[in-house]
Image (cartoon, helix red, strand yellow):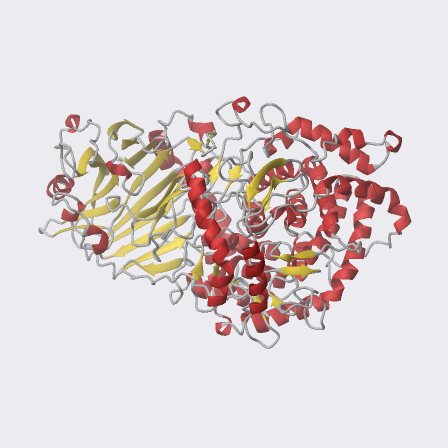
Amino acid sequence: MLVNGFDGDREPSDSCNDVEKVDPGKPPSLTWQRKVNSPGSTLSEFSLSVKEIIHMAPIGYRIWRHLREEAAKGRGSFINPFTKRYVSSCHGVPLGGIGAGSIGRTYKGEFLRWQLFPRICEDKPVLANQFSAFVSRPNGEKYSTVLCPQNLEELNKESSPSGIGSWDWKLSGHNSTYHALYPRAWTVYEGEPDPSLRIVCRQISPIIPNNYKESSFPVAVFTFTLSNMGNTAADVTLLFTWENSVGGVSGLSGHHSNSEIVVKDGIHGVSLRHMSANGLPPVTFAIAAEATDAVHVSECPCFILSGNSQGITAKDMWNEIKEHGSFDRLNTAEMSMPSELGSSIGAAIAASVTVPSEAVRTVTFSLGWDCPEVNFSSGKTYYRRYTKFYGTHGDAAADIAHDAILEHGLWESQIESWQRPILEDKRLPEWYPVTLFNELYYLNSGGTIWTDGSPPVHPLSSIGERKFSLDRANINLKTVIDKSLQNDTAVDVLERMASKLEEIHTPTSSNSALGTNLLQKGEQNIGQFLYFEGIEYHMCNTYDVHFYSSFALAMLFPKLELSIQRDFAAAVLMHDPGKMSLLHDGTFVSRKVLGAVPHDIGMYDPWFEVNYYNLYNTDRWKDLNPKFVLQVYRDVVATGDKNFAKAVWPSVYVAMAYMEQFDKDGDGMIENEGFPDQTYDTWSVKGVSAYCGGLWVAALQAASAMAGVIGDKGNEDYFWFRFEKAKAVYETLWNGSYFNYDNSGGTASSSIQSDQLAGQWYARACGLLPIVDEEKAKSALEKIYNFNVLKVKGGMRGAMNGMLPNGEPDKTNMQSREIWIGVTYGVAAAMIHEDKPEMGFQTASGVYEAAWSNEGLGYSFQTPEAWDIEGQYRSLGYMRPLAIWAMQWALSHPKPPKQETKPEIKEESVLMQHTGFKRVARLLKMPEEEGSRSLFQVIFDYTCRRMSM
């Protein structure tokens, strides 16, 4: 399949000789740039108004109590607002492939934001991890420096006089520039440290569209291009140092060891075995460099960074290179002892080369790591995807680093072929392609986990004490099938549901959302994929947010996208009656009911215990099920995979039937229930709403189209009939210039919601008919642009979620007054679909100006969920901004020719389908919510409602 002109399905060649070679020393013409000495911005976190504090105080108390209770059980919570994180505005391109752990890097050169284990993010830099340069010339001139500006705040904490504080931290960074175009970055040291030497470090990780092998590798390659503009030769030694640490204070836990790697294909290296503490699995790192006829490589397997361990110190190691240019004089046999408790150790590898006058030389390093196990708090362990190719023993870091040096030329050629057509598209504003690629950082840094697709390592027969029941009233699905209606589609779906449930809930996957069981014969199992809603919001594959971000996977890694959808299709048919306490009012509800699309796939025990989110009862949310149907159909359109469509169709049908209980008046339209029952989970909505109502209308049309794909003519007509009926109700929200927030008549009912056309946007993205008249869609988008965009800092912030008709921000709640970055990209995509690309780019440019520009707020490579009008952020490093790829989808999928409307479907012609659908819906209907609230809560809620009037 061609994606933006890139044929990612082609077989990689065995060598780089037959591919276009890319000059690693030349950054592309379009990149995100910063001066290495740029001080960055001071980040400001959001604050609550007095009214919001009063309203959310009980929730805050329950979160605090919940955190204590869950910590005692070793579980944790999906959010911890009481923990303050180390934040920096200097982030750059992170290291590694997808789902194998992530190590961040700043544009200054620091390595930070370590995410090697689920839920653990060590934000602070490990300052011993550095590249350094040593230059000497025949006339006696010598230069030496760490290739990173001095971090005085952190270096002042260095207590040992023989530690890294003794190194030469002389880089000013004034003439050095960092360039980023994910997954590559270039740092150009112009005359630093030697005024006549230009050093370019190109960093690359194997993020390659439609590549499901190398893209999973935990590795990065650094190629240095040395250009000598002086009149004499320059003897240059580049030094790569690495602490045996996984971030934080882990290096002091003891028992870590380093060793030289056996030289192969001219590649030298050091292996660092880290014996993780606190029950975490061990990690092995490898730093490597390639020796050539011109490049000499030497190693220092171990030096002491701090503590009382015996051996060569960091200062001694530095002086060895400074005086001799290599480690050839070291006795490495004395460096094999494990570290002591309280001591930290590192390793170093040096590459030396002579660069003649007016000549260019290159030196290549790599960093690999191997942490094959993913352990969750529940006790289950999975293996990462890359172990399919390197084994599960945890000793493959050296091989990974070795292979990367040999193969990265091919990776770069493929990345270049993917990115060049977009970079050279003159129709696009310059900021857009750069931001488009750089927002993909989240596929690496978003807590991503990519498994090998196998069940947990531990036998599942030993876990899961609950018994699965399809129905709370103990009704067996098969007993409700009327044998006299064998041609009824609903009967067929019920039979297939029962069969599929029996297939999914086998002893090896009992009571789970393991979508691998939905793979059809001959289909490849490429593993399962998890990513966090946010670095601060620990829920995997949060589905209401994935609705926006999924375009990135659908376009670049469609098999991963289908894997996620299979998991949720399996989850729809899953029932978990275990009780959980809701944080908003303290009541207890079932964790997940049959037919509901879960909010997330879990965190404590992913796939087996879904819905880690427990602020509200998401079984009553109105956006999740329609979003599932829309995404599934979009993915069928993207891949043309009919086998996938057939496999998930029972779940699509059940998801639609489940929603029938929310059509209270039988007019074909679902109604919101007066609480935040959708992705805007502090913004209450009641009755027919623009957001959820539009999603429902679009989902009905998508269900009809999908029934057509699999050849179910009866349901194709039935869902089309339902679509036409609901569409007419949705039109009642139209007020002459936009669609009202809802029809409840409340204070927020007339709010101009930026996301009001989410259903229309997705219908267009799926190639379906519009759900509203085109002129109304354009009018609503113009209203959004003129109010939600232009009235907020002159269009330099993005689209505010809610604006009042008088042009003031909607301040009825925290989220209505926020700008959501991913929603802004979605709105921009909707504008492009409606033939308003200039408006779309102008809307999205506000996000660029705020997050990515030189004059912005410092949110690059950590785009938050939201900021307010003053730029104060909420939730740094968030999933939803991947929605910029929805803009690329809109640009890549032009609006199809005007389609003819189907002939009117008469109700009597779909009566059989309607009867069957109703029967399934009755089976799925939830009982009335149980649980009671305290008198205090009732009085408090009443007071809050009065205050908001």
Residue 280 vs residue 243, the one in the foreground: 280
In the rendering, at what x and y percent does residue 933 appear?
Answer: 58, 51
- Location of residue 735 with respect to 197 vertically, above or below: below
Quadrant position of residue 495: top right
- Location of residue 705 with respect to 783 vertically, above or below: above
Q: Which quadrant holds the N terminus?
A: top right
Residue 695 vs residue 840, the one in the foreground: 695
Q: Position of 445 compared to 688: left or right? A: left
In the rendering, at what x and y percent does residue 220 appear?
Answer: 37, 41
Residue that lies at the very extreme toward the left in this rendered image: 140
Q: Position of 130 compared to 22: left or right? A: left
In the rendering, at what x and y percent does residue 399 appear?
Answer: 36, 29
User: Residue placed at 53% from the left, 27% from the top?
Assistant: 455
User: Residue placed at 69% from the left, 33% from the top?
Assistant: 470
In the rendering, at what x and y percent does residue 835 appear?
Answer: 65, 65
User: Residue placed at 65% from the left, 49% from the top?
Assistant: 620
